[in-house]
Every structure is written in C-alpha cells, then in structure tokens.
Amino acid sequence: MGLGKTVQVLAFLLLQREKGERATNLVVVPTSLVFNWQAEVAKFAPMLRVHTLHGASRTKHAAEFDGYDIVLTTYGTLVADVRALQSYAFNYVILDEAQAIKNPDSQRYKAARRLQARNRLVLTGTPLENNTYDIYGLLSFACPGLLGSRTHFKAHFATRIDKFKDESQARALQQKIRPFVLRRTKAQVAPELPDKTEMVLYCDMGPEQRRVYEACKEDYRNLLLGRREDVQGKDHMHLLQGLTRLRQICNSPALLPDGPGFGAASAKLEVLLEELQNHAPQHKILIFSQFVGMLDLIRPMLEAHDIPYQQLTGQTRHRAAVVQEFQQNEQVRVFLISLKAGGTGLNLTEADYVYLVDPWWNPAVENQAIDRAYRIGQTKKVVAVRLICPRTVEEKIMQLQETKRELAQDLIRTDAALLKTLSRQELLELFD
C-alpha cells in the first residue's frame, strides 16, 4: 500500500547483519516484483548480497546460498524447487504480497510450510481478500499453532464472522492476532504525503449500449427467478458469468465474446478521452482495468490522439524497462495497467491521476491500485477517479463495498468474494 514495507524489511536485515547474523534469508515475491526488490536493495541497501533464484538458468543447489544475505525468488519457483529449498535452513523466510498463500489447499501454501526457518514474516497490504478464513493461511505460516486447526478456526471464527456477522467473535479474533500484526497506515507513517482526492465520474450509456445491457441483464434475471432455492454449483457459475458480462458491457459491448455484433458504443471511452485530453498535458496518468480487452480498446484511442503511453499486462516481459520508461520519460503521459498484473508492488510516483475504469467487489484491491501513485515519495496531490455507469451493476457494487467496509476495517480485512455470501434476494437486486 506504499507504506515502505520493503524498505523496512531491508533496514531490519541490515540490522541483523550489523549484529553479526550472517545467515541467509529467503524472500519470496510475485514474479512482477522481482525487479522492484532488486532495485530497492540496490538503492537502499547495496551492501546486502542478493542471489536471484528465478528463470531457466537458476541454480538447483541450495548449498550455493551460503555467502548471500538474501535469496530472492518467486512463488512459482518456490513450488517448482521446493525440494531443494526445504533442505536449506534459512534465518528468515519473508513472504511479500503474502495473500498469495491465503488458500491452505494451494501448492504455494504447502510449499511455504515446508521451508525451514528460524523466523517467518508475511507482508501484505490486503491480509484478507475473500473472507475471514484468509487470515488462517497467513498466520498458520507465520505463527504455526496460533489459530488451531483449520476445522477449529472455521467453526469458531470464520463461519460465525462471515455468515452470522458475530461481532463478539470478530473482536475475539482481533485480540488473538493483535500481538502478531503490525498494522501501519499512511497517516501514521507518512503524514507529509499530500492530499488524496477520490471522486466518481458517471458515464451515462447511450441508447445502443443501454439496449445491450438491459437485454443481458434480463436474461440472467430470468435465470435467477427460475430457481426456487439458493443458487449453488453450476447456477452460481452462470450468475458469476452474467455479472462479468454486465461489467464488460458497462465498459464496452465490444468486450463480449460476440461483441462485434453489438457495436462499439462506450460511454466510458468517451468520458475517458475527454479526461485525458484535459489532464495529460499537465499530469501523468495511470489507467487500471480488470479487462485487458478494455486496455486494448483504449490503446488505439491514445494513438489516434497522439498521447504517448506505456502498457503493462500479464504478457509484459520487460516490466522494469516499461516502468522506468514511464517514470523517467517526460513524453510518456499515460500508463495502461491490468489490475491483476500491476495492482501491487509498483512505485509510480510520477503519476498524480489514477483512473479505475471498472469497479471491483473488493475496495482494498482498488486502493492497492491507487496506491501505486499515492505512496511514500509522492510530492503531488493525487486524484483517483472511478468511472461508473449509473443504473447498472456497477452502482450496486459500490453499495456492497460500503456495507462491508466497517467490518473490514475492524478486522483488518477486505471482502472480495461477496457473491458466495449473498442471499437470493441480494443477487436479484444486482440484476434489478
């Protein structure tokens, strides 16, 4: 969230080194953050010796880790090389963006639990993304035994808090984990940061786009009305597909699999173009979307109006070069970023406008995206703009975010997978 977690860890490892602790530490990060950690070490702690364990030419012999302060690797490499890694006794194992191990059934979680370490740290700006059960994965790695068995945690905490909104159990869990959680906010860490303004721009659909939206909404509403009981299994997947299609139509009907037959009308593209023409000459701008296809629609629009840009998606190979080009080249005014590929870890403080093209269930995911610009090192006032189509599922997503926000803040949690917890009536309201 831009609070300097990486720098804080590097300072701690330097302190360990000064005290004579020469044991090797393992840092595990998403692939997208390898270059970020390399750059941060080079900038703030160049005396730390780093071995990057990643790529086809990486070493397979753990004995070679001796002599390094940090072995830097990725979650994918951890899973692939766990047999070699588990044979080495590390001083600290540090998991960055540790929500990657939130699912105890995942290969990443199982591989992480097999590591030998004197100490363990998890770093994350979103400790709980889906539900209260997410905290179990993180803390059962960092503090084994603290929360008991999975069955015990589900019965005593997760189910009571998520399903029955048991505030007493939420407080009990908060008390239990508090000694092991260091929570830092920007107000505490960086009071010198300039103001951040968040606003909503309403993009009213034209007749063509509205016709496509209403037809799709009616199809899925009829599907839901045809079910007498709560939605489960395949029906749940059909409705999730329907909500995704509605969100795509809000961006542009062209995003649908059969989109070309619906035309390319898009209120958001029209509003976004006007915004870019007004602000790009004086401000650097980040544009986030969950749909790479939407970025593909924005790109030719930028080219047609001679607005220089860079783009980062899951397919981008040379991420460091792309980020550097945006940060250092004054001519590059816009950075197109897919939320999944670039929503965490990046330092993009040259930007002071952030556009979120499509809202998501989880407000913390949106905040992570905004905080690519609003982080330590930012000297300009940041403006974050959400593009919303009125009288659509997007407005209802915003309302759901608000209903979940209070509990999320109390328990250091956020709620992304709301769909699974919604009643039939609440689902109907989404398609209303």
Image (tube, helix red, strand yellow):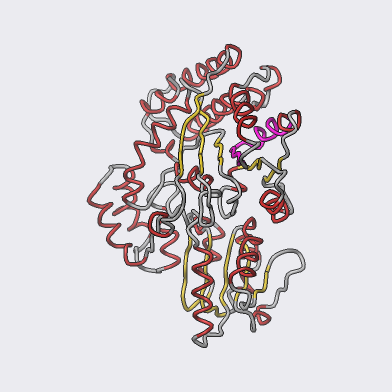
Above or below 321: residue 388 = above
Q: Nearer the viewer, residue 12 or 110?
A: 12
Residue placed farthest to the bottom in the image? 20
**Figure disc tally:** 0
Tell me which segment is drawn in magenta: 285-300
Find out whether residue 297 is within the magenta segment: yes
- What residue is rendered at 68% in x and 22% in y? 258
Q: Nearer the viewer, residue 106 or 394?
A: 394
- What residue is rendered at 34% in x and 57% in y? 153
Q: Nearer the viewer, residue 204 or 55?
A: 204
Residue 206, image x, y percentages: 58, 14
Find out whether residue 165 is within the magenta segment: no
- What residue is rendered at 58% in x and 70% in y? 44
Residue 374, image x, y percentages: 51, 49
Above or below 130: residue 54 = below
Q: Nearer the viewer, residue 196 or 394?
A: 196
- What residue is rendered at 73% in x and 70% in y? 58
Residue 173, image x, y percentages: 29, 57
Residue placed farthest to the left in the image? 168
Residue 228, image x, y percentages: 38, 23
